[in-house]
Amino acid sequence: MARYRKKPVVIDAERWFGQVGPSSGFDVVVKYDGYPQDKKCKHCGMEMRYHGWIKTLEGGHIVCVEDWIIKGVKGEFYPCKPDIFEATYEKAK
């Protein structure tokens, strides 16, 4: 297997703290209306009522509070867990 390094690409990202709608600055995140609202999330343990939903190129994804919302190189949006974000990205200078 060959090894590859990720190309250095500057991305736009914001941390999501549970607000939805135009006033939140996150037009791409909508209120999550899937599972029963009192069900606990398998990722963060919070009730689903506190989660968002984002449409991505791969389909829809649940957004947990404090996930990062990343704008990709083609203008697409997707969520990223905080630990993965911290391991993958650093603040651009």
Image (spheres, rainbow, N blue to C red):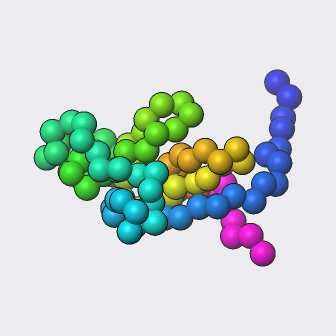
Q: How many numbered marks appear?
A: 0
Q: x and y percent of residue 14 in the render? A: 53, 64
Q: Residue furthest front?
A: 22
User: Quarter-wise, where is residue 62 in the image?
Assistant: top left
Residue 87 part of the magenta-drawn span: yes
Work out whether 37 lies above or below 60. Answer: below
Q: x and y percent of residue 11 in the render? A: 69, 58
With 55 as the anchor, is 10 left or right in this view? right
Work out whether 70 lies above or below 59. Answer: below
Front residue (pair 3, 37): 37
Q: Residue at x 52, y 50 (%)?
A: 80
Front residue (pair 50, 1): 50
Q: x and y percent of residue 51 in the render? A: 30, 51
With 47 as the anchor, is 64 left or right in this view? right
Q: Mostly what secondary structure, the magenta segment?
A: loop
Q: Residue at x 86, y 28 (%)?
A: 2
User: Quarter-wise, where is residue 1 in the image?
Assistant: top right
With 53 as the anchor, is 3 left or right in this view? right
Q: Residue at x 83, y 38 (%)?
A: 4
Front residue (pair 74, 49): 74
Work out whether 71 lies above or below 13. Answer: above
Q: Could one spot residue 14 in this view of the protein?
A: yes
Q: Could one spot residue 82 in this view of the protein?
A: no
Work out whether 26 lies above or below 74. Answer: below
Bounds of the magenta segment? 86-93
